[in-house]
Amino acid sequence: MKFRVKEICKAKGLLLEELATTLGIARVNLTKTINGNPTIETLERIASALGVPVTDLFEPPSTDVITCPKCGTKFRMED
């Protein structure tokens, strides 16, 4: 799952380092968190610091890609 933290920071003119400072953590830890599997509590703290709902942190699913439920292979749908 991908998160939009970097994109939201950029739109707000905020560096990841500044967000990390606001959260009271090191930038490297913030990067590991958003590239890993953050807890809902961590996502809530990040969303609060950015002034957005938690749902805004998630990348919307692609509407033109289907994932095979059996093997996990992704297929792009074309018109």
Image: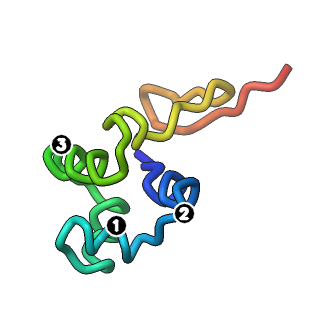
Q: Nearer the viewer, mark 3 or mark 1?
A: 1
Asked whether the beta carbons under mark 2 and mark 3 sit within 8 Å of each other, the answer is: no
Q: Tell me the quadrant of the picture where the N terminus can be found.
A: top left
Q: Element type at marker 2?
A: loop
Q: Does residue 7 appear left or right of residue 32 in this picture?
A: right
**How many other residues sit within 10 Å of disc 2, few (<14), some (14-19) or many (≥20)?**
few
- Residue at the far right: name it: 79
Question: Could you give the CA–CA distance between mark 3 and mark 1, rounded to whole angstroms?
Answer: 17 Å
**How many other residues sit within 10 Å of disc 1, few (<14), some (14-19) or many (≥20)?**
many
Q: Residue 33 in the image: x percent, y percent?
A: 27, 63
Q: Nearer the viewer, mark 2 or mark 3?
A: 2
Residue, disc 2: 13
Q: Does residue 39 appear left or right of residue 54 in this picture?
A: left
Asked whether the beta carbons under mark 3 and mark 1 sit within 8 Å of each other, the answer is: no
Q: Nearer the viewer, residue 2 or 9?
A: 9
Q: Element type at marker 1?
A: helix
- Residue at the far top: name it: 79
Q: Earlier in the sequence, mark 2 or mark 1?
A: 2
Q: Residue 79 in the image: x percent, y percent?
A: 85, 19
Q: Earlier in the sequence, mark 3 or mark 1?
A: 1
